[in-house]
Image: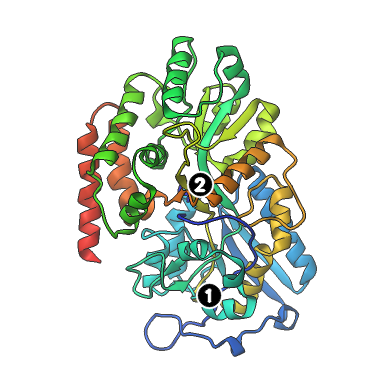
């Protein structure tokens, strides 16, 4: 999810999943969880006795909800001594309440903790999550996942660096932020799915000229504009430059390509290419409105694909963002979904680890496909049946082959969603210039880097 919905992850490849979990009981020295030796890890869930495992997730939509409900039911059928107490919240609500829950005396056992400096790094720094490395030695996740994917869920002990350090989560689904399009509208407008940005600009002008909303867009939460900006940035800047910038190892938000991306966003808004009053429309309402016929195109994550497939059937298509030139490799935000993590105060860490291992296993990848989702690793025996999900799967494969994923921008600093998302709202509303928006981003970024 980020990212509002997922949001969220960074460079890496694609393909199968299988296990996660974490371990280490809270230690007696300070508030950091103490390490647990692999030999002390128990994988025998049946011998744990009757356990209620409290799990907080944000899998509230369509196929994502169906996916986790099926996996929870299968886990409880396999281990009748375990009851899953599932608490589900929207992404934004989960982010608002998670820190308070983790700092309390009775936190959940398993949570989906968003990657990046704003969430996972802060939780690690505060000693709220268990490092998963001892469980990895038992379950072998590092042998199954590409290093780039595991790096997304890794943080140093002091919370100062993401992308390295210990493992604090494992993800189930892959994610791409790409371009949805209404096939019926394209046909009526005489437009083909655009292969280049130049073709896309022409398509937007055509749609606007014929009375259509070119791009369905809702931006109350600020993150949608950041994702749309990020897609434009990926089309103008080198992917390695974007990665270095987000992770804090080089570059400036006021560099030329980054300002150009803001200018393009401002131009689209000025030309009326977005839904009217976009800043007053909720993000989760955007795909609902798009399915009802508002908008020819819609930028969004693959987490919306199951619902859109149910609502629109063969009317909806999905593609990676256009290329600078036809046939050129494309980069876009993506990676993996929110990781499943174990809280430092969990009284059932071993069972929590077994649960995470179960819901990210190869069989779980098959369930992901069956419920219309995108597994982060190849499913061993299932292939998507719906045309939309085949397009999503093909796009994920192309990105993986080309190493084309870039990080969600909200990873850059703990306050970036407000510090940059707010100015982008004003940019969309015509109240702030591209240069002013990028200066605001750089000011927040510099302040955070100086404090690290």
Looking at the image, which residue is at 49% across and 75% down?
Answer: 130
Residue 14 vs 452, above or below: the answer is above
Gap in angstroms between the C-alphas marked 2 and 1: 24 Å
Looking at the image, which residue is at 39% across and 80% down?
Answer: 31
Percent coordinates x, y for residue 81 in the rendering: 75, 74
Residue 46 vs residue 160, the one in the foreground: 160
Residue 199: mark in rendering: none
10 Å crowding of disc 1: few (<14), some (14-19), many (20+):
many
The picture quadrant where one finds residue 172 is: bottom right
Percent coordinates x, y for residue 364 in the rendering: 70, 59
Residue 143 vs 449, above or below: the answer is below
The answer to whether residue 438 is visible is yes
Residue 326 vs residue 330, the one in the foreground: 326
Does dot 2 land on a helix, a strand or a loop?
Answer: loop
Looking at the image, which residue is at 47% across and 54% down?
Answer: 9
Residue 268 vs 152, above or below: the answer is above
10 Å crowding of disc 2: few (<14), some (14-19), many (20+):
many
Quadrant where the image shows the C terminus: bottom left
Percent coordinates x, y for residue 74 in the rendering: 76, 62
The answer to whether residue 72 is visible is no
Percent coordinates x, y for residue 153 in the rendering: 48, 64
Q: Is residue 78 left or right of residue 251?
A: right
Q: Is residue 251 left or right of residue 100?
A: left
Q: Name the residue tied to disc 1.
A: 132
2 or 1: tag closer to the N-terminus:
2
Marks 2/1 in contact by CB < 8 Å: the verdict is: no
Q: Name the residue tied to disc 2.
A: 5
Q: Nearer the viewer, mark 2 or mark 1?
A: 1
């Amino acid at each position: 999810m980020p990212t509002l919905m997922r949001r969220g992850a960074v460079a890496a490849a694609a393909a199968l999943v299988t296990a996660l979990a974490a371990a280490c009981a809270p230690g007696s020295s300070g508030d950091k969880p103490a390490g647990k030796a692999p030999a002390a890890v128990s994988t025998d869930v049946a011998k744990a006795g009757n356990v209620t495992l409290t799990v907080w997730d944000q899998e509230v939509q369509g196929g994502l909800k169906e996916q986790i409900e099926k996996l929870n039911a299968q886990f409880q059928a396999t281990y009748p001594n375990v009851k899953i107490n599932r608490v589900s919240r929207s992404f934004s609500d989960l982010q608002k309440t998670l820190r308070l829950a983790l700092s309390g005396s009775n936190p959940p056992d398993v949570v989906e903790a968003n990657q990046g400096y704003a969430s996972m790094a802060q939780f690690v720094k505060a000693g709220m999550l268990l490092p998963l490395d001892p469980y990895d030695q038992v379950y072998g996740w590092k042998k199954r996942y590409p290093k780039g994917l595991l790096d997304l869920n890794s943080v140093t002990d002091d919370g100062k660096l993401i992308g390295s350090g210990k493992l604090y989560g494992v993800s189930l689904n892959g994610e791409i932020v790409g371009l949805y399009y209404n096939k019926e509208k394209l046909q009526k407008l005489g437009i083909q799915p655009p292969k280049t940005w130049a073709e896309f600009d022409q398509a937007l002008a055509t749609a606007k000229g014929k009375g259509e909303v070119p791009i369905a867009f809702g931006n109350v939460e600020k993150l949608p504009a950041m994702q749309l900006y990020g897609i434009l940035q990926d089309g103008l800047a080198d992917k390695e430059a974007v990665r270095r910038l987000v992770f804090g190892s080089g570059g400036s938000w006021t560099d030329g390509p980054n300002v150009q991306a803001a200018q393009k966003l401002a131009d689209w808004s000025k030309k009326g290419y977005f839904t009217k009053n976009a800043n007053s429309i909720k993000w989760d309402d955007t795909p609902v409105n798009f399915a009802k016929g508002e908008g020819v195109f819609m930028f969004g994550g693959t987490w919306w694909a199951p619902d859109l497939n149910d609502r629109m059937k063969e009317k909806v298509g999905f593609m990676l963002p256009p290329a600078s030139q036809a046939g050129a490799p494309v980069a876009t935000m993506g990676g993996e979904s929110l990781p499943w993590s174990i809280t430092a105060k969990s009284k059932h860490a071993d069972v929590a680890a077994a649960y995470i291992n179960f819901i990210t296993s190869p069989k779980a990848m098959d369930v992901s496909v069956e419920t219309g989702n995108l597994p982060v690793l190849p499913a061993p025996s299932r292939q998507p049946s719906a045309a939309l999900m085949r397009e999503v799967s093909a796009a994920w494969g192309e990105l993986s082959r080309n190493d084309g994923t870039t990080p969600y921008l909200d990873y850059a600093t703990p306050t970036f969603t407000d510090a940059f998302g707010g100015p982008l709202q004003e940019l969309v509303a015509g109240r702030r210039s591209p240069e002013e928006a990028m200066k605001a981003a750089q000011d927040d970024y510099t302040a955070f880097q100086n404090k690290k």
